[in-house]
Amino acid sequence: MIPVTDAIQIVLQQVSLLGTESVPLGDSLGRILAEDIIADTDLPPFDRAQMDGYAVQAANTADTPARLRIVGESAAGAGWHQEMKSGEAVRIMTGAPVPAGADAVQQVELTREADGDGVVEILEPVQVGRSIVRRADEIKSGTTVLRAGEAINAAMIATLASFGYAQVKVGRQPRVAVMATGSELVDVDQKPGQDQIRDSNNYTIAAYASRCGAIVERLPLAGDDTEGLKREIASAARRSDVVITSGGVSMGVYDFTKAALKELGAEIFFERVALRPGKPTVFGRLGNALVFGLPGNPVSVAVTFNLFARTALRAMQGATDPELKKETAVLSRSVKGSLDRESYLPAVLSTDEKGTLLAEPLRWGGSSDFVAFARATALINLPAGNKTIESGRQIKIFRLPA
Ligand code: AMP
Ligand code: MG
């Protein structure tokens, strides 16, 4: 058995970058940036009005109501490009350029424009700079605004769009083949017969993998038979960057996944991790493909995928933080650890009235209880060597991806 951190290091050592490609901005969500993103303009690109109202000289509004002559109009996309003078005002809209000579914008609610006489009354004084965002106040042209290795989220799309990244250079997507093994499995559209259950792992792994940006191929269900497994794994390894199997790696008489990998000549880097749940996790290489042999229990699948396979898939695409995010929380109910293995137990996070992050271990039926696991938002990480950790203790947690 090797410690979890060693296993993750081994995974990272075996990963090589997949190379990069250019994708249209609209297809870039969730991908890993392969270039730094540089602002090609100031933001805002001109002194910009933040309110609908009147551009004025603040000094003109000291005594109210101040009557100012309206000399023009500045709209978003159609500014007024003359010099505004003392005693004058320019009607201005949100997002429009503030004319030269003006130093404040008074919002329209604090003004009164009499019909037809070309004069506005400013009803309250306004300070210099009010409701103006100065050119480059937000971003200066040339600034690096996003870095290579960051995963593109929805909020970053505005940044990419605003600086003209119609095409974005990102890490190539890993091709991942997913294969559930077990003679008891039937497809989701089948009614399980005697001694059978529906496969869920193929769909779980596919869902998590596509969340990491992978192109997923779900292989047909494989029975517990070494020759069949060898055939399927060998063929999947030829066309994939990563093969992820589930089931058949523990000590049962019909657990053939490891045997199949070894007979195929796969290099096995580890096959037992000091981890609960997920001890029998296998990691190896077959040809150019990395192979993860995850245990069969659906919760073990979720835990081991997120610790090992997710890390590999993100690292392959160039992610600078491929691992799950580690944080500290306070345990809100006592929980049992394990003497010889590190535990990664499902938990729900919340905060108390002081703002302290709390982790409540799920009440669950163990590593087959995927219905309970679906409520988990994090994994509680307990070091090996612990029996019971009491409520109120500080512990490490890893947030689970949604
Ligand atoms: P194994 O690791 O093959 O011994 O499987 C451990 C447990 O997980 C057994 O109860 C299996 O029936 C169950 N299991 C294995 N594969 C799947 C799957 N694809 N979907 C749901 N449950 C599974
Ligand atoms: Mg099995």
Image (cartoon, rainbow, N blue to C red):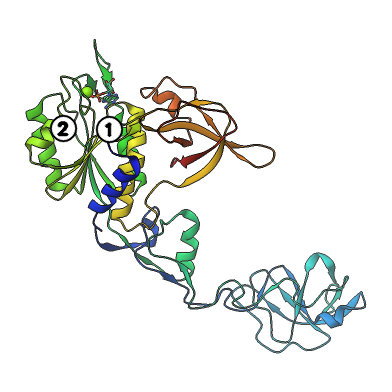
Quarter containing the N terminus: top left
Residue 396 placement, left or right of 253 = right
Residue at which label 1 appears:
202
Residue 357 placement, left or right of 354 = left
| Residue 137 position within the rendered picture, expressed as x and y whole percent measured from the top left | 62, 74
* Amino acid of disc 2: Lys
Quarter containing the C terminus: top left
> Disc 2 versus disc 1: distance between alpha carbons?
18 Å
Residue 43 placement, left or right of 194 = right
Instruction: Indicate yes or no: mark 2 CB to ligand 1 under 8 Å.
Output: no
| Residue 293 position within the rendered picture, expressed as x and y whole percent measured from the top left | 22, 35
* Amino acid of disc 1: Asn
Splitting the image into four quadrants, where does ligand 2 fall?
top left
Looking at the image, residue 258 lies above or below residue 85: above
Looking at the image, residue 74 lies above or below residue 190: below
Instruction: Indicate yes or no: mark 1 CB to ligand 1 under 8 Å.
Output: yes
Q: Nearer the viewer, residue 121 or 304?
A: 304
Q: Nearer the viewer, mark 2 or mark 1?
A: 2
Q: Which of 44 and 280 is in front in this view?
A: 280
| Residue 276 position within the rendered picture, expressed as x and y whole percent measured from the top left | 36, 30
Res 350 → quadrant = top right
Residue at which label 2 appears:
258
For label 1, the crowd category at 10 Å Cα-Cα, with few meaning under 14, some 14 to 19 and many 20 or more, is many
